[in-house]
Amino acid sequence: MSLIFPSRRTIVISWWAVSLLPALLPAVASADPSKPIFPQAELCPLFSEPSDVSPAEAGPDINPASDRHTVPPYAIVTWLLGEKPVRDRVLDTDGDGNTLIAEKVRALTEDDYCSSSRATCTAEEEEALASARDKLRRFADAGGGPGYVIERLDEAGSSQAATNNAFLPRDLIDGRERSLRIRCVALPEPIGAEPEDEPYWHLNGDRPGGFRLVGDIDNLSKSRASLGAVKAAQLSITSDLIEDETAYRVNAVAGYAFEVAGGDDVVTSFTPFLLAERVTSGDETQIDTLGAGFQQAVTLNWPGPLRSEFALTPIYETDSDFDSQIGTLKFRWTPAFAESAGFPLGFPNVYGPVELRFGLDLLVDAGRVFDEGGEDNLDGEGTFLRLGNQASMQIRGAPGGLFRPIELQIANRYLYNLDTAFEHINQFDAALAFLFPGNENYQLSIAYSNGRDDNSLELYEFWQTQFGIRF
């Protein structure tokens, strides 16, 4: 969105200052080192009673119930691949229709698995495998860590307590030639403290918060696991087809996201943000918008085929002369399918040489023009209410393919305006982008836009050559 306010005074406000925002906010807390890296409830199915076995006592002479405390390799593999699901066809690298333990071990121990094998991982699956490898590596480096002990086996199958933590991740999960054994042990209780249950609301480890720099407020809450789907902040050269002139555009939204999770099914984020848009042709500023607000987004991952994200965003917009004042309350519902549904709504799916993703947003904008700032194009001071939707499609090269850095995005946004003579507000955008290999924070693109601005209500049409940045 943008406001059109021709100004004779020049007030230079650098939107780059918003990049200092992360330095003013606290960092996300780290994970609790006293908790197991792997949950005992998942890997020790017979570990129903608190064990009286300490790490010092966990040797070969533990009988009876030695099997009761032993963790089989396949249990670790199953848990790691089930925490963030990876499709069987990604793991079935020989294409025989069977996913063997050896193929799963390969996926969990080879850092370049997605790029070097015939597997076509999505961005989410690539991140899931990287996260699983990291946990397995930390488990090996810690010698099991809290709640576990790793024993070495000699040729006769007898075990002895390990004297160091020099374990290879593959040795922990390769069941064919195992030289190690993993056992569950009792977690030490803090001295003088009662054991505490895991709080329902906790910092979200899967989607950590942090600095956000995007091109649209609806992209603030998008997962950074698929960074290519996030609309970038833009520095662009614009060819205005209506005014028949060339202009220079800066468009950015910057904020800091705080994310927490409620159990395994609910993720919520709170993101205060600033926005800036400035279009200059020669010495004349044609568009000049400043804004501030916050976004509260809630993602529901309840069992079933449908996922949902709801976002509520109050925002105040003005210009650098502070002549105009507009307040808007935006509501967005973004439905998405689970990957098991097959249709790639809200997630990418690979079809031969391309990766395809569809998006759908249902929108409600309610606001008030407190001061039109002397701008004739605004529809006077008063309230407005708009209902609509945004549909989008993204096509990329398949992971590991030659065309992976190439991306085509098409989006159409429609709002029905209940309170003005301009009932239909339609905005069409298409962009062909090249993403920098190995770093999708940056892109170069050519874009076409056509429609009616939803603040000024003026028609626009232009081509852009863009340099995009997103975090």
Image (cartoon, helix red, strand yellow):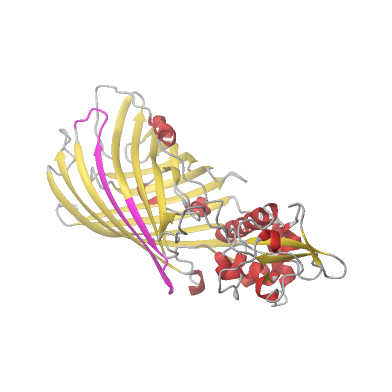
Task: Pick the quarter of the image with the N terminus.
Answer: top left
Q: Residue at x 24, y 44 (%)?
A: 455
Quarter of the rendering containing residue 389: bottom left
User: Compared to 223, does 118 lie above or below?
Assistant: below
> Image point 53% across, 43% down: which residue?
441
Image x and y of residue 180, in percent: 77, 64
Q: Front-most of 376 and 51?
A: 51
Could you say which quadrant of the image residue 15 lies in?
Answer: top left
Measuring from the top left, give residue 251's x and y in whole percent.
38, 38
Q: Position of residue 234 (x, y in %)?
A: 44, 39
Q: Is residue 92 visible?
A: no
The extreme right residue here reads 155
Q: Is residue 113 visible?
A: yes
What is the number of callouts on the image? 0
Considering every residue shown, the one lying at the far front of the view is 192
Main SS, magenta residues: strand
Residue 77 lies in magenta, yes or no? Answer: no
Residue 465: x and y, percent?
47, 39
Residue depicted at x 69% and y 55%: 143
| Residue 297 sits inside the magenta stretch | yes
* Observer-nearest of 22 and 464: 22
Q: Is residue 23 left or right of residue 45?
A: left
Left or right, 205 with respect to 183, comes to left
Q: Nearer the viewer, residue 263 or 84?
A: 263
Identify which residue is drawn at 49% across, 51% down: 224
Asked whether, in this view, residue 42 is left or right of residue 259, the answer is right
The magenta segment is 296-323
- In the displayed structure, does residue 42 sit left or right of residue 376? right
